[in-house]
Image (cartoon, rainbow, N blue to C red):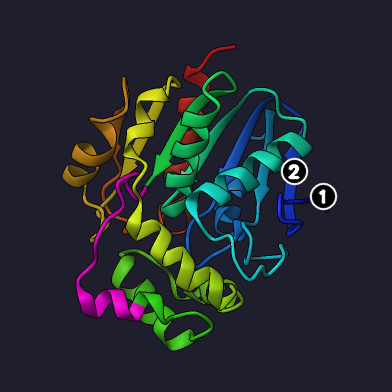
Amino acid sequence: MPTVAASDQTPLHYRVLGEGPRNVLLVHGWMVSGAVFDDVVEKLELTGLRLVIPDLRGTGKSGMAASGYTLEQHARDVLAVAEHAGLKRFTVVGHSMGGQVAQWVAAQEPSRVEGLVLINTVPAAGMQLPPDAAGLFRTSGGDREKQKIILGLACKQLSAESLERLLKDSVTVGKAAVESGFDAWTGGGFEAKLASITAPTLVVATDDPFLPPAFLREKVVNPIKGARLTYLPGPGHYPTVERPVETAALLTSFLAGLGR
């Protein structure tokens, strides 16, 4: 399994599936690892695709750094993975906080990013949660019961088996990644960068109780030139796990539309 050192020497682990020529970088969100994409990857037809799936610092098989859980550092880490994997041009798919990281990468490297898919993304401006929810989220690192409550609030169509797999993954995420990551994604603060995004952009909305379609249209679609919204009714915050077949179909359709 490939690993590359981040700018502060934190080991970043990633997986590569398929042989291309189209490169797709899949960036996961908060409180999970790259394993959150496993169900979608299983449903994707990999012919012509090369998927690169990193574990962000503090998650999965990547290093448990003491610091560096900012959106900017995550973006640098993702670009280090892209470089190491030899991705000259690529599409970025980001989920939740990973959608913020994907927006940062697309704004930072517009000449290299040929497509951008934002699944239930947190806006570049961040978002505030009610105090009780914020307290629950921020202190959930390593706490299976709190994480089970969070997933229960966020998801609409999660099977018991899928919930268990998510919990097994999320409970291993480092406490620093959970606490500092929460501060990073709620804080946002880089909306001025969005003007630099030139890639065709698809924003996927669901019946997510925290990020409803109207909110995503206002805060994500409208600030990105040429971005469009697609609505997948039914699932909550994790359509990659709740409805992987439909999510894979949306990705396949978007990638086919990019041409060569």
Residue 237 appearing in the image: no
Measured as percent of width and height from the top left, residue 143 is found at 49, 86
Asked if labels 2 and 1 touch by Cβ distance under 8 angstroms, the answer is: yes
Numbered tag placed on residue 2 in the rendering: 1
Mark 1 or mark 2, earlier in chain:
1
Measured as percent of width and height from the top left, residue 232 is found at 30, 44
Q: Residue at x 71, y 56 (%)?
A: 8
Query: How packed is label 1: few (under 14 Cα within 10 Å), some, or many (20 or more)?
Result: few
Measured as percent of width and height from the top left, residue 99 is found at 44, 45
Q: Residue at x 75, y 43 (%)?
A: 16
- The secondary structure that most of the magenta stretch takes on is loop
Amino acid type of the residue that numbered disc 1 sits on in the rendered structure: Pro
The answer to which of 188 and 231 lies nearer the viewer is: 188
Residue 241 appearing in the image: yes
Q: Is residue 214 above or below residue 142?
A: above
Measured as percent of width and height from the top left, residue 80 is found at 70, 41
Please count the marks in the image.
2
The answer to which of 81 and 115 lies nearer the viewer is: 81
Amino acid type of the residue that numbered disc 2 sits on in the rendered structure: Val
Question: Which residue sits furthest right?
Answer: 1
> Quadrant of residue 23 in the image?
top right
Using residue 161 as the reference point, say whether residue 208 is left or right of it: left
SS category of the residue bearing label 1: loop
Numbered tag placed on residue 89 in the rendering: none
SS category of the residue bearing label 2: strand
The stretch drawn in magenta includes residue 138 = no
Residue that mark 2 sits on: 16
Query: What span is colored magenta in the figure?
Result: 120-136
